[in-house]
Image (tube, rainbow, N blue to C red):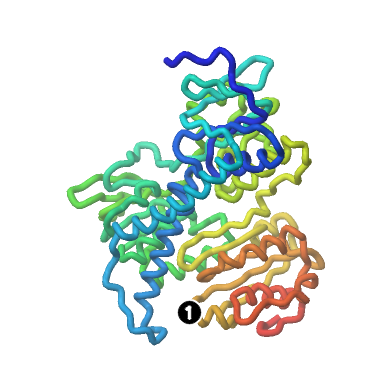
Amino acid sequence: MPQLQDQPQQFDLVILGGGSGGYACALRARQHGLSVALVEKSKVGGTCLHQGCIPTKALLHAAEVADAARTAPRFGVLASLDGIDMPAVLDYKDKVVTRLYKGLSGLVSSAEVTLVEGEGRLESRPGHTPVVVVGDQRLEGRSVVLATGSYAKTLPGLEIGGPVMTSTEVLALDHVPQRVVVLGGGVIGVELASVLASFGSTVTVIEALPRLVAAEDEAASAALSRAFRKRGITVRADTRFDSVQRTDDGVTVTLEGGDSIEADVLVVAVGRGPVSDGMGYAEAGVELDRGFVVTDERLRTSLPDVYAVGDLVAGPQLAHRGFAHGLFVADEIAGKDPAPVQDVLIPKVTYSSPEIASVGLTEAAAREQHGDAVRTYQYDLGGNGKSQILGTQGFVKVVRLEDGPIVGVHMVGERMGEQVGEAMLLVGWEATPADVTPLIHAHPTQNEAVGEAIMALAGTPLHAHG
């Protein structure tokens, strides 16, 4: 055991975890003139930058390029797909991550954040804010922020290793497996299924719930399932996993009921759990619920001057939610009285092919809250010029209250994630369709589809039926 310092180092703010929530909090706190220690056991940027959002989306872009080459003759371009060079794909992915990591490291350094490398844990002190212990160092802050993120979960008895892997191991695959079973039809599962299918794998998705991406609007789930079937991806919803057996050729996946599937690889994508075990949280008096840190709407934990952000707090596990949490907490500690982050206003994008993008209430959730006052309109991308140029299908669905604001926007189609920014503004500002119809959407863009749907809801459809 290392000998601890007699006196802890003093800071205005000590942040445990350097992912999206932690580093955002650190940079904003420095803008407020606070002294900050940022503790990170691996690399600043956390899961999002190194094992999640960025590398996954790099692979998804490579998959998009593969699909473009495969379908080039449809557009009169003489090209073909000769195969996937996975080592080269990984090199491209790693270069993207490295460039962003260097940029982020430079930001943290130039902001004069004290970066403490090592695995930290919380240590209680009766009557005082807990200290963060890192090796032989003790860091004391007037406030402490817990930002230790999440990890890829598995199922009881399902051991990760070899041909059984989580999203983390998939990102290091140096070859394209011929047959893949993806266990889990949530966001991570369908994104990985989409990548591997584009690379040439035969993919089966197993989902225990009745539909894919069950948190999305039912219309979006149905559209994604149809698109996957057209791409040759087998979807087995409402189906439970029983066991897996490793074989000489890969794995045999057995489902409840006795069906089995032979595959080279089993990708376990059953969600992510909070990194709270072994961190000293419970011992210090931080209230936990199923491993998540319990907070109020201002992200305060059960201990005075201790906050929690990001995936550690139950809710949508999205990097930009953690980022928003980090900014909010820094502003809160600086006395700026910021508005709380509302989960319902956090935009979501599933970067599969096709993409799903949404913000606000689904139609079902809106009807549960508001009953018969809910009105919806679904504009088909078949009427959108740019979508036809791109060769994509899908829709924009807008949910509003009768004589009231827009409360949800749900979109399906290639590149529709780029439209979610306007959708978030519409829902966040509680705009009515009549507020939006005077706004001009450039032609030809997919963005026009948002305007068309809203004009229809306002009773003034142009290229759509009201």
Label total for image = 1
Q: Quadrant of residue 310?
A: top right
Q: Position of residue 314 (x, y in %)?
A: 59, 41
The 10 Å Cα crowd at callout 1, few under 14, some 14 to 19, many 20 or more, is some
Tell me where residue 154 appears, x and y as whole percent: 40, 41
The residue closer to the viewer here, 376 or 307, is 307
Residue sitting farthest toward the left: 248
Using residue 160 as the reference point, say whether residue 314 is left or right of it. Answer: right
The amino acid beneath tag 1 is Gly
Image quadrant where one finds the N terminus: top left
Residue tagged 1: 391
What kind of element bears circle 1?
loop
Quadrant location of the C terminus in the rendered image: bottom right
- Kindly tell me whether residue 290 is visible in this rendering: no
Q: Nearer the viewer, residue 64 or 166?
A: 64
Q: Is residue 424 above or below residue 312?
A: below
As rendered, which of 303 and 333 lies closer to the eye?
A: 333
Q: Residue at x 55, y 47 (%)?
A: 317
Q: Is residue 429 left or right of residue 86?
A: right
- Residue drawn at x 66%, y 78% is 442
Q: Residue at x 60, y 37 (%)?
A: 112
